[in-house]
Amino acid sequence: MPTPGHRLSAPLAVTLAVAAAALLMLLGLWLAAREFSERTVVEQGQSLRERLLLRVAPAITALQLTGDLLASAAPDRPTPADARELVLSSLDNNPGVDAATVCDGAGLLATAVRANGGMLLHVRGPVGPVGTDGAQPARWQRIHTDATPPGPGTPVDPAMGELCQRMAMAATHPPRGVPDASDGQVPARRVAPAWTDVHPLPTTKGQQTMPDGQAGETAGPAPATAPATAPAMVMTAVVDASGRQPGASPRYMGYSFRLDGLLASIALGLPGDTRVLVISPRGVDSGPHDTMTLADDGDPVRKVALDTWRQAHMPRDTAFSFRVDGTLWQASLSSLTSADTRTFAGVAMPQGLLLRMLLRDATIPLLLACGGLALLLGAWWVHARRRTIGAGEAPLSDEALRDLLAGGESDRLEFKSTLRHNLSSGKHGKEIELAALKTVAAFLNTDGGTLAVGVDDQGQVLGLAPDGFEDADHLLRHFSALLAQHIGVEHQPHVRFTVRVLDGRQLLLVECGKAVEPVILHTGKEEEFYVRMGPTSRKLALSQVMRRLRGNGSTQE
């Protein structure tokens, strides 16, 4: 006969099983909440950088183009007059830029700063001591503004000299993974923009310590409630515009962006109670740990978050936790602009907010299911978009395509017999590929158009057999690689290409829209700018490109 103890063993086992299942569920929920919290705070911190880069992307593209043009200029250019025109046109054409600066080996050449609806301009004066024939001190000029620059005879503020130092350091520092030239050759010019750390850009006299250690009035980091007379805190994007010839003098072009405007932009859309964290070195020669917070408003959450981050040896893209007045917070900081910068930005979010985000409007299984469905839909959309861009259905019927070809070449249509085969020499040639890409770049820089490859000058379909591709897929992959190499993947969304069969013969149809940003053709030796003029693609000279940028497409003087 079983004992009472034996009779209780089954209920006890069931109870233990239920308790174990509940504990496992709670553990799973806790792990899921922890993983969600860490992932969310890292993603929110990283999204600050994405919003920043999205905000400045148009200006950065213009800066890259200007740097390429300067690098192609004569060794004795730019002159102070050239630099003056560059900085003024940069602010006119790029409303998101707060200051434009050109520096050379001797220091500041010209700078223009937005101020009270207008600009403050400083251009280097003639070389020579004041009082000699023709030599005058450089002065600040006001252009459509009532802002007060330094005194009429006051030379440029020393902080501007420090800005040129920062620009030179950023532009000449090689990106990670790129070794310095050690064989005596001229190192390759850094084409991609570099970023300085956060720094002041004063336009009034005596608000910054002089970089050479001389005495001067000083000011601490600009808090969010800083008075109007405090120097603006900015970040500067820099391109190396040094000439391509050996021994060419250094020259740099920079666009500066006010930090208060950037912070306001990147903070949009963040959940309530979220704190934005930004930290940067104090000066040009500061060590990586000699940093200051750029939102030093006395908030204990920011103070504890940044102290904890420093104590954890400044981890990047990694969540860390801390407590303030009994509340648990999660935070993460990422490099604000690139892997080489010492300026970091991120967020701090209370754990309660993260849990509400996890459980809001749905249960965890529903969130996971929706997340999985969203990932599948996102992957399907990306795949479908790539197929549409790379080999989507042609919008033209065969009859419409015949009518298009019969109309002959125009400003919106051009024919090429082959993509890579030189019919004269009987061999494949890079010059044939570049000829087709020049047409694509010209269409993108003008009003768009269509390139038909495998068609003679009279509009007769010749086919693609001379190019020797295995199949249509091989041809499309080859053309896609050419676009990425010589024009850039950022412009591929404006290009749709497909292989069509007409009268039993294949042709490559490349349909181009008008690009949002200027398109540069990289030939391997040079960088060229083409536009469409009638039925031809015309290469513009440096001066013509500059006038086109300033005049919104006009090439008139």
Image (cartoon, rainbow, N blue to C red):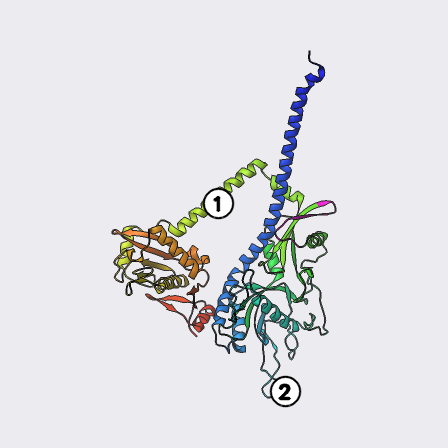
Within the image, what quadrant is residue 107 found in? bottom right
State yes or no: residue 316 in magenta.
Answer: yes
Q: Is residue 395 visible?
A: no
- Residue beneath label 2, please? 131
**Mark sitting on residue 378:** 1
Q: Is residue 522 above or below residue 383?
A: below
On-image quarter of the C terminus? bottom left
Secondary structure under tag 1 reads helix
Q: Where is residue 217 in the image (x, y as percent from the top left)?
A: 72, 71
Residue 219 inside the magenta-drawn segment: no
- Would residue 360 be visible to someone looking at this image? yes
x 57%, y 36%: residue: 365
Taking the view exactly as shown, the residue that stands out farthest to the front is 183
SS label for mark 2: loop
In the shown orientation, is residue 85 left or right of residue 42? left
Residue sitting at the far bottom: 133
Range drawn in magenta: 314-327
Sequence order check, earlier mark of 2 and 1:
2
Q: In the rendered structure, which amino acid carries the disc numbered 2?
A: Gly
